Structures are given as structure tokens and as C-alpha cells.
Amino acid sequence: MEIIIQPTPEVATSVAARVIARQLRDKPDSVLGLATGSTPLLLYRALIGLKLEWGQVTTFNLDEYVGLAPDHPQSYHSFMRENLFRHLKIDPENIHIPDGMAKDVPKFCARYEKEIKKAGGIDLQVLGVGTDGHIGFNEPTSSLASRTRIKTLTQQTRRDNSRFFGSEGAVPYHVITMGIGTIMDAKQIVLLAFGEQKAKAVAQAVEGPLTAICPASILQLHPTVKVFLDEAAASQLQRTEYYRWVFSNKPEWQRD
Ligand code: GLP
């Protein structure tokens, strides 16, 4: 894992945006895995500002709430449309987001997996992390080999996400999420985490034991993960000096 600690979310995001920009320049028909939540908002704003070529890009989103139609304001369909897709020249046919209204959820999930495979697999997956260490909506104790499926949210996640819904009662109980195995199949992973409230999950994911109690800890087994943090999210890590040392002493060919 490469841990990149920057003074603010804005600076960390601009470094992460460069990684994605390079991916799209190197492979214009890249397949991107995309995340929602407040964390990637700055990233999407940065990507819009970079005026990249999106014509051949395919995207797969991590997750969606069960029972929310695409035009529901809190659906991840709406989130992606508002915060990224409507600002880009991307082919709507190439955008994939789990269908929260799917009649046959297991069948839909199997098809989602097949579509990812058919597209050639995900080249770069963007991730945030929940305060409980979840990635996508893979809550603690999710199978580390799981594929796209339905999950029940923890009370903690429902509480965390109630800020988008106005009240906790309005947050759905169920979601469709790519599995941890699905996420781990991505060729490259970029995880962003900002703020004090993420510090514990980040420390557990990066320096803790590999355990289903902290789903993000599985990333220790992935060969190409970059973790972008601000100072607050890095505040519970023990090896920050080493991470900074690595970043400032990269061989020339590894720099941007
Ligand atoms: C949400 C999403 C995750 C996201 C996480 C953190 O529930 N399903 O993909 O990474 O929780 O969200 P936020 O960035 O708003 O803190």
C-alpha cells in the first residue's frame, strides 16, 4: 500500500486526480469503478475541471440503496448524475450503477458481475471508507471473497448517512453492493479518506490485522493500492514518518 498524507483534503484530492487523469490518458477506454459519499466530491470536481476525454470510458458504481428509484434525490444514481456525469461527455450506455429497484436482486447482481467482466474488468477503482471500515457497502464481517449482492446496513452506517436523508428513519436498510472480491479484482485501487472521524478505520485498514471486522483491511492483499489522506484521517497511524519519507524519496520514474 502506498500511503499519501497531504495537509488538506483539497491537496490530497489533487494528487489523486492526477492518478486518474494519467489512467485515462494512458488508456482512453478505461473502466473506472466509482464511489459515492462526501469523500469523492472534491475528486469529481477536480476531474470535471481537468477536462479529460471521457468518450470511451466505462464506469461501474460500487453500490445503490434498495428501494430508491434512479430519480430519488438520495439515490446514488442522482448523486452520480449531479456530481459527475452531467458535467462530462460520457456515453450514458457506458455508465453502470446497481439498480435499487431490481425485481430479482440476485439475478441483477449476477448480471452486474458479468457486465464488469465483459467490459474487461475494472482498471481503477475509487473507494472511500466508512467509519466502521466498510468499503462499498460491505459492512464488517462481510465475506472477504464476496461478490455483488444485497447487504443490510449497520445502524452506524445508517446513522452516518442519515445526514443526506434528513432523518435516520428515512435511510434504507438494504443496499446492493459490489462484493469485496469484486473490488479486489480491480487492477488499481485509489482510496480516499478525510477527517478525524475516519482516523480509526484508516489505522485499522492500513496497520491493523487483516480481518473481516474491518473490510478495508483486505486492501493489504492488493498489489496496487494508493491511500490518499489528510492529516486528520492519518492521525491514528503509527508509521506516518515512514509514509512521508517514502513519498518524498520516490524514484524519479515513479513520480508524476
Ligand atoms: C457510504 C458509501 C461508501 C463510502 C462511505 C463513506 O455509505 N457506500 O462507498 O465510501 O459510506 O462515506 P463518506 O465519504 O460520506 O464518509
Image (cartoon, helix red, strand yellow):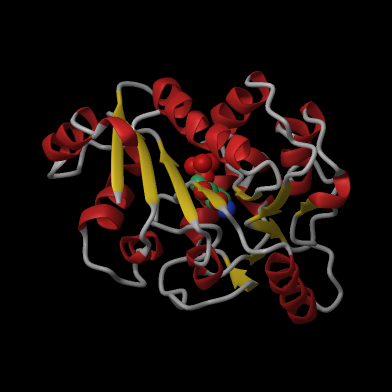
Report whether 211 appears left or right of 78: left
Look at 60% across and 58% down and name the residue there.
122
Task: Note whether residue 253 is visible.
Answer: yes
- Rendering quarter of residue 81: top right
Look at 70% across and 57% down and name the residue there.
64
Q: How many marks?
A: 0
Q: Position of residue 216 (x, y in %)?
A: 39, 59
Pick whichever, 31 or 234, lies toward us.
Answer: 31
Which residue is situated farthest in the front direction here?
253
Quadrant location of the C terminus in the rendered image: top left
Task: Note whether residue 75 is visible.
Answer: no
Look at 65% across and 58% down and name the residue there.
63
Up/down of 7 relative to 157, above or below: above
- Rendering quarter of residue 113: bottom right
Pick whichever, 231 or 13, lies toward us.
Answer: 13
Q: Position of residue 188 (x, y in %)?
A: 47, 53
Pick whichever, 126 or 20, lies toward us.
Answer: 20
Report whether 177 appears left or right of 89: left
Up/down of 83 relative to 1, above or below: above
Q: Position of residue 85 (x, y in %)?
A: 77, 35
Report whether 24 appears left or right of 95: left
Look at 46% across and 45% down and name the residue there.
190
Up/down of 101 relative to 24, above or below: below
Q: Position of residue 50 (x, y in %)?
A: 63, 21
